[in-house]
Image: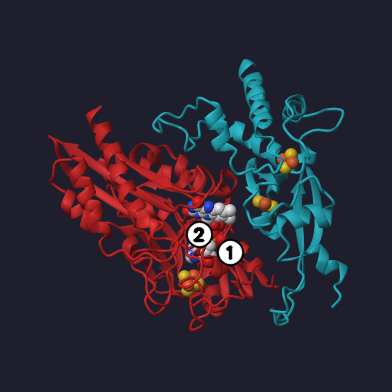
Amino acid sequence: MRAFTYTRAADTSAALGAAIQNPEAKFIGGGTNLVDLMREEVERPNEVIDINRLPLSQIEELPDGGLRLGALARNSHTANHLLVRQRYPVLTQAILSAASPQLRNLATNAGNLLQRTRCYYFYDITAPCNKRQPGSGCAAIGGFNRIHAILGTSEQCIATHPSDMAVALAALDATVQVQSANGQHSIPIEAFHRLPGDTPEQDTNLGHDELITAIDLPATPFATSSLYLKVRDRPSFAFALVSVAAVLKVADSQIKNVRLALGGVAHKPWRAHAAEEILTGAQPTAEIFRRAAEAELQAAIGYEHNAFKIELAKRTIVRALTTLTERHLA
Amino acid sequence: MSFSIEQILRGDLPRGGQSPPAAADPGLLPVSLRINGHDYHLQLESRVSLLDALREFIGLTGTKKGCNQGACGACTVLVDGERVNSCLTFAVMHEGQEITTIEGLGQPDNLHPLQAAFIEHDGFQCGYCTPGQICSALAMLKEVAQGDASLATSDLTKAEVDLTDEEIRERMSGNICRCGAYLGIVDSIRDVYEQQKGQ
Ligand SMILES: Cc1cc2nc3c(=O)[nH]c(=O)nc-3n(C[C@H](O)[C@H](O)[C@H](O)COP(=O)(O)OP(=O)(O)OC[C@H]3O[C@@H](n4cnc5c(N)ncnc54)[C@H](O)[C@@H]3O)c2cc1C
Ligand code: SF4
Ligand code: FES
Ligand code: FES
């Protein structure tokens, strides 16, 4: 690991000031992704700005009935907050399905959103990788690509975003609260992460000298009926091959509200708008679930080792919706 | 190429001739850590992990380095009572916090109930993962007592846990045992859980 200057920020303006002064500096939250990547020399900041003393760990109700999750609230604390458990079970399950209890105790909500891909070639500094070194090529496209994306890929990069939490946030229409020298603004979660296009080195639309302060969840009464279904190689402590965050309200044998987002399939949490459109107002049947899943995956492209994800994603959607519908009937 | 002993201790060997020399060395920082009730005043580089500070600079080698990337749990210690992977965090970030390692839990003539249970139930073979397992289990039992959920918890609206074996396994999945002593580990934890409940 390279040597770096350690700066402990006492408050938000000190943190932002340090980042503005040094374009090579990086904020550190839990460190569970950054320390790992620094050790591999994928990330090489010459300064690390410790933001852990900033007062951004609260989880509080918003006046409109929503919830504000502090940027520095730990993943474990967020998942176990009673209001999150009761109102947004999909978020609790997504977080609890990620990493391990020890890691979730360190991991912060902001750091989770900004974790980088687990593409093996991104981690291997001897391999070509457009995300790590723009213009060097993509070793995954012709290489081993079992964990890679099937939707929204480009010829530059087929990496996936590994966060489970972010998939639940996409289904919940969360907004990311950002502080910069110019003031506070918010970014809807769907506009936060990017597709790779010609600039796979940019994971998100967050600037270098912008600090995430919180993630807001809008009031969503029907989110009490929600779940996170994660399919992986072993049943615990593994990244998703495919995952589905689903929110579903059925009344009078009709789908009143539905939200679907997919993980493990794209460079960003994939909100399944095409499927939602087919489902809204329809009767909740196995046929319509399958039709919605087919529509969402229509544009999917499989590579040598990950083509199985296309059918897997469809089945995972169907199973998530079936499970929630059965709960409504029970 | 030869390496200095400091480089080896820091785990900071040049990798495959890839790295150009580091820029200006920011040098050593005074770092004060409170570990098992004792204060340690160290001079560390900022890049020293909490794990390396414990093992290489303080000599508390009970905490183990398995993967050094968050994937095995051998390095689990408690920070302010919460279990964390000491390999993925810098020591300097933990000034002012209370750190507990396996050395702080019990002594050979006065074992912690979890240590005694691991012996009783064959919760280990080689023992390499054991300090991490025990620190992890201790925090896990506290999480259960405060009603924290896991992915194995069916009703999230109730802050009460029925600690089934499935729950224990899910809650301990951050600790890998290369010897596969899992049955004994689950038995040890259940035993201590029941002892505590009986009290
Ligand atoms: C073995 C292992 C298994 C894992 N398995 C899973 C899994 O199954 N599912 C999953 O979702 N995740 C998984 N993870 C990833 C884990 O969830 C992330 O590492 C963690 O959420 C990152 O949070 P952090 O606070 O530690 O981030 P850090 O490492 O501290 O930071 C990550 C990035 O965010 C930036 N940053 C942090 N806070 C802010 C802020 N407030 N404003 C602006 N920038 C900021 C940092 O500069 C850095 O670039 C796993 C990790 C490991 C090591
Ligand atoms: S998929 Fe993206 S991250 Fe992986 S090697 Fe290709 S460019 Fe790099
Ligand atoms: S050494 Fe820290 S998790 Fe393996
Ligand atoms: S006892 Fe050998 S690794 Fe667990």
Residue B18, position in %: x, y?
A: 69, 79
Q: Label 2 vs label 1: CA separation?
A: 9 Å
Q: Which color has been applied to chain B in this rendered view?
A: cyan
Three-letter amino acid code of the residue under disc 2: Gly
- Quadrant holding the C terminus of chain A: top left
- Left or right of residue B25: residue A274: left
Three-letter amino acid code of the residue under disc 1: Leu
Which of the colour schemes (rainbow, by chain, secondary structure, one colour) is used? Answer: by chain
Q: Nearer the viewer, residue B180 or A196?
A: B180
How many other residues sit within 10 Å of disc 1, few (<14), some (14-19) or many (≥20)? many
Q: Is residue A84 above or below residue B86?
A: above
Q: Are marks 2 and 1 in contact (CB under 8 Å)?
A: yes
* Residue A108 seen: no
- Left or right of residue A229: residue B52: right
* Residue B182 seen: yes
Please give the residue where the numbered disc 2 appears in the rendered image. A111
Q: Is residue A287 above or below residue B90?
A: above
Please give the residue where the numbered disc 1 appears in the rendered image. A34
Disc 2 CB within 8 Å of nearest ligand 1 atom: yes
Q: Which color has been applied to chain A in this rendered view?
A: red
- Left or right of residue A63: residue A274: left
**Counting residues from the N terminus, which is met first, the one under dot 2 or under dot 1?**
1
Asked where in the image residue A308 lies, by quadrant, the reply is bottom left
Classify mark 2: helix, strand or loop. Answer: helix
